[in-house]
Amino acid sequence: MPIEVERQLNNLFTLRGVKSQIVKVIVGPTFTRYEASVDPFSFRTEQFIALEENIAHLVHAPEPPIIYPIYERSVVAIDILNQQRSPVYLEGLLSKVGDISAYRLPVVLGSSVQGQPHVIDLVDAPHMLVAGATGSGKSVGLRSMLTSLIYFNRENTRLLLIDPKAVEMSIFSDLQLAEVITDLDQARDALHYVQHQVNARYEMLRGAGVSNVAEMKGIPYLVVVIDELADLLQHDKMIKDDLLKIVQKSRAAGIHLIAATQRPSVDIISGIIKNNFPARMAFKVSSSEDSRVILGNAGAEKLLGQGDMLYRFASSFERLQGAMITNQQITTLLGKLPSTFQRFYKETGNGK
């Protein structure tokens, strides 16, 4: 099947006057990627996007392909949905993770098209925006990423989770793995406290004559996860100011944010917020406008749901499959680890 599709695509390129040919085929759990060579100085992605309907008709695909450039390899990816999708589970991905000794805060985002774990160092991110409509797999994807974060970083990391819906993150509180705040007023106060902690940590770094927390012993990383960002920003105008102060200077202080929303509209995700979140992850969204807000490009509106995602870091795009995880699986993976849980916020008295 892939060989025949490759031949059909090359014939279509010739027929339509597109100077390209398929140079690589990768069969993944959800889709098969056909990589088309391009001239990096003259190609236009629109030439390939114009062929979406023709490609879907040629290969009898239930959905149009998703087409996007991979600039660093001078190819255009053409992702065609497989007739059958293979589920991806976090436990299986964790067992495949290789040497991550150089990573300071490793996080498994999901599966690559090759079926391998896609691991990032959150310190390099250093902050991530996540968007996805209802049913896109965003919440499961977030819980899967958090599980991997705790799995690899239990000794040197504190988690502050803001979950106004009081549903998605409760398992981490139940297992004494993280501090979960569900009240919006407390969430506002907690972010204000985090902003002050950024300044306090900078004073400590200056006093020790070092440039970041990795050079100091005894200061844990802090990862703040917000789900849902829109609820917070609409609750109190002060929250946006504190959020920006945190993301603009917290990297050296060892404080990192992951902010998720179902509503990535321009009034929620303003330009100044986007500019301070270099890492962006989009599950299926409602419209091409939402996709452009979160990624800078259309395409996320065509994703398949159930964990199908596009991840952008700087100018690089990757299409990934989020991993499935249940509360029972989280308990199995994390429940037997030695507890190093410490409250970051409430024990200070600020959350009372």
Image: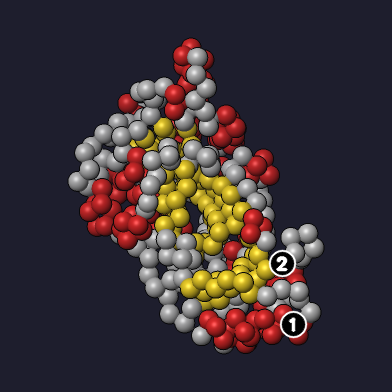
Q: Is residue 151 left or right of residue 231?
A: left
Residue occupied by mark 2: 38
Nearer-the-camera pick, 351 or 326: 326
Quarter-of-image position of residue 150: top left
Nearer-the-camera pick, 263 or 311: 311
View extreme (front): residue? 23
Task: Quadrant for the C terminus, please.
Answer: top left
Circle 2: element type = loop
Q: Are marks 2 and 1 in contact (CB under 8 Å)?
A: no
Q: Is residue 205 above or below residue 152?
A: above
Could one spot residue 309 in this view of the protein? yes
Label of residue 14 in the image: 1
Q: Is residue 89 above or below residue 339?
A: below
Q: Is residue 88 left or right of residue 44?
A: left
Residue 159 horizontal/vertical position (percent): 38, 38
Residue drawn at x 28%, y 34% is 341
Residue 125 horizontal/vertical position (percent): 53, 42
Residue drawn at x 62%, y 84% is 7
Quarter-of-image position of residue 21: bottom right
Which amino acid type corresponds to the residue marked 1 in the rendered image? Thr
